[in-house]
Amino acid sequence: MLQINAIEWDADLAEAKRSHTMTHEMRNVFAGARASEVTAFEAGPWGGRLSCGFMESATGRPILCAWADAGTSAQVLLADEENLSEAAEIALQFRSGSEKRG
């Protein structure tokens, strides 16, 4: 599952990005998801922050990856991955494929 929000579409996100750091934003994402073993990874060519962590579930341990930069906030939930590094690579593929910047 992929969710992307951008400041162009979401006035509340634009305001939140003006008043909070990316570190604060990422901490809230993973705290809200009750993720464990949250690890930071290279965020790719657009910079910002990318982290992934394990979520508890009755059906396994899905991995939540999230990225944030000055204009976007996104999350991807991966149900079949077992390794945070591999999940981060997949998240970067989602980011590259979904965010087109000129």
Image (cartoon, grey):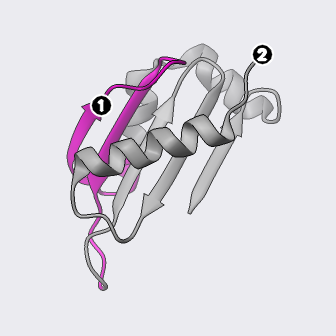
Q: Amino acid at mark 1?
A: Phe
Judged from this view, the residue extending furthest toward the left is 37
- Label pair 1/2, CB-CB below 8 angstroms: no
Query: Residue visible at 62% across and 26% down?
Result: 16
Specify start and end residues of the magenta stretch as a single range: 30-58
Q: Residue at x 34, y 51 (%)?
A: 87
Using the image, determine if residue 28 lies above or below residue 36.
above
Disc number placed over residue 41 in the picture, else none: 1
Bin the neighbour count of mark 2 within 10 Å (Cα to Cα): few under 14, some 14-19, many 20 and up. Answer: few
Q: Position of residue 73 (x, y in %)?
A: 58, 35
Q: Where residue 45 appears, x then y in whole percent?
A: 50, 18
Amino acid type, mark 2: Gly
- Horizontally, is 3 left or right of 83 in the view? right
Per the image, the residue denoted by label 2 is: 102
Name the image quarter holding residue 44. Answer: top left
- Side (left or right) of 11 relative to 43: right
User: Dot 1: within a 10 Å radius of its alpha carbon, few (fewer than 14), some, or many (20 or more) residues?
Assistant: some
Return the x and y of residue 59 as percentages of the image width and height: 31, 85
Residue 80 sits above or below residue 66 on the image:
below
Q: Quadrant of residue 51?
A: top left
Give the quadrant of residue 89: top left
Residue 85 covered by magenta stretch:
no
Q: Depth check: 47 or 56 in front? A: 47
Disc 1 to disc 2, how far (Cα)?
24 Å
Name which of mark 1 and mark 2 comes first in the sequence. Answer: 1
In the rendered image, residue 97, in percent from the top left (x then y), is placed at 63, 41
Please, what secondary structure does the residue beneath circle 2 have? loop
